[in-house]
Amino acid sequence: MVSTFGCNNGLILSGARVYYAMSRDRLFFQAAGRLNKKSVPGIALAFQAVWAGILCLSGTYSDLLDYVIFAVLIFYSLTIGGILILRKKKPTAEHNSRGVSFLILPCAYIFVATAICVDLLIFKPAYTWPGVIIVMLGIPVYFFRKKVLSGQKS
């Protein structure tokens, strides 16, 4: 229980900071980018609490996990792939580890995550596809918002 509450604490605090940072970059609601008198993004925390409540009431934990795990695995794999690309493009940059062994674990993760994604697409399409569609809906919203904001700067 202690570990679970510790993990939740970290996720709650970091999640609100993500909304805060997105707001500061003008990619999320402006209100989420304000700090309260305790230097905490209170509005972002409240937004996150409301959203978490809605998600909790929308179904079981298993259903929620099935909806998001596909997208999470894709984004984690892309992040790890980005690290590999960065290593290739900037080999002289300071890194924590060197050598061939560094490639084995990230490549294994990408392979296993891809296998899990394929498995989810085959065996749980009713949950996987809605999750993919929800993530994909963010792409036009992002470009629309970016276009609107670039028009405001002119």
Image (cartoon, helix red, strand yellow):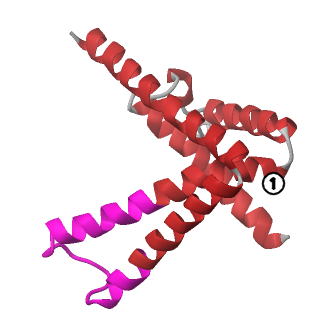
Residue 69: image location, x then y, percent = 63, 55
Q: Quadrant of the C terminus?
A: top left
Side of 127 relative to 104 (left or right): right
Q: Residue at x 81, y 54 (%)?
A: 62
Q: Residue at x 48, y 60 (%)?
A: 76
Q: Is residue 133 above or below residue 100?
A: above
Residue 149: image location, x then y, percent = 33, 17
Residue 45: image location, x then y, percent = 67, 38
Magenta range is 77-106
Majority secondary structure in the magenta region = helix
Q: According to the image, label 1 marks what residue?
A: 62
Q: Is residue 146 above or below residue 122?
A: above
Side of 128 relative to 8 (left or right): left
* Residue 81 part of the magenta segment: yes
Q: Is residue 39 above or below residue 4?
A: above
Q: Residue at x 67, y 47 (%)?
A: 125
